[in-house]
Amino acid sequence: MIAHGNKIKLFAGNGSRKLAADIAKELNMELGAMTAGKFSDGETSVQIGESVRGCDVFVIQSTATPVNDNLMELLVIIDALRRASAGRITAVIPYFGYARQDRKARARDPITAKLVADLITTAGADRVLTMDLHAPQIQGFFDTPVDNLLGSSVLCQYIKNKAFVKRDDLIVVSPDVGSVARARQMAQRIGATLAIVDKRRPKANEMEVMNIVGDVSGRTCLLVDDMIDTAGTITQGAKALIEVGGAKEVYVCCTHAVLSGPALERLKNSVIKRIYTLNTIELTEAKKLPMIEEITVAPLFARAIESIFDELPISRLYE
């Protein structure tokens, strides 16, 4: 609990209402009075309903679907708070949209992640608090401090103490080479071995699995990734583990459940037994499949907000 709560205020955008309420509850606080909606022509409308002069303000808003609406709403909220003389504004973005557009993959491509970083800074954010950026170098796109929380700290604790307590045949699997570091860290933390799905992608949004690096035969596999978007990589990887590697069962854990396009249909028809995901993105009722189990990140974000407010290092959260 924050003892001097009269100088800190939390505000929630429409993209993270439930998570923001849970974070406020963890801090024994109430969310600030604010209405965020749209004018009749579709423009974003924001009205701050209380004084924030001199306060340390935290705006909680994931920029998930609808991405542009949530991003614009975040920018307008920050601008409103800045013009209302808030002492310091921290943009709490559990899921940072546009993070995958972090480099020029082809000629004349934009680097949209940098553009979004500039927009947030220009709007008036003094710092950013987020979780599991798709590319860690995005922190360098900002001219303000960025705290990138590790979703694996929450997932590891849940996997080790609740989901697979009695499983001694568990093996952690990276769905591709790009996720090896993340999967290796998970394997070390929960005391499991590591395997890799070796794949070749002939063209965009198509994947051809070549082989499995590591022995998964008869094992319970846990695929680890930072996000599930269209679910192509995860479902193809799970299929390969069963059909090529001879795995017994396949489970999945991720930080961000984007679940766009054909994701739901692919997951329903997959061999995946269960998906453990963090609630950085609020799932609609249509996306709440029985196989999906959400794990809250509210306690971790609450402690991080507390650390920022009390000028304490974020690293203490993982000790």
Image: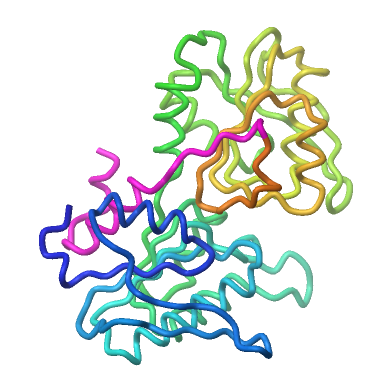
**Residue shown at 75%/21% (left/top)?**
241
Number of numbered labels in the structure image: 0
In this rendered view, identify the residue nearer to me: 309 or 107.
309
Residue closer to the observer: 270 or 26: 26
Q: Picture coordinates of residue 316 (x, y %)? A: 23, 46
Residue 147 picture quarter: bottom left
Between residue 115 and residue 164, name the one nearer to us. Answer: 164
Magenta stretch holds residue 9: no
Taking the spot 16% from the left edge, 61% from the top edge, the residue there is 310
* The magenta segment: 290-319
Q: Position of residue 181 (x, y in %)?
A: 53, 38
**Point 26% across, 82% down: residue:** 52
Q: What residue is drawn where x is 57% and y is 24%?
A: 172
Q: How is the image coloured?
A: rainbow
292 left or right, relative to 152 = right
**The stretch drawn in magenta includes residue 291:** yes
> Quarter holding the C terminus?
top left
Indicate the position of residue 112 as horizontal and vertical percent values: 63, 73
- Residue lying at the far left in this picture: please name it: 3
Residue 279 vertical placement versus 59 (above, below): above
Is 192 rendered above or below residue 87? above
User: Residue 90: image x %, image y %?
Assistant: 34, 71
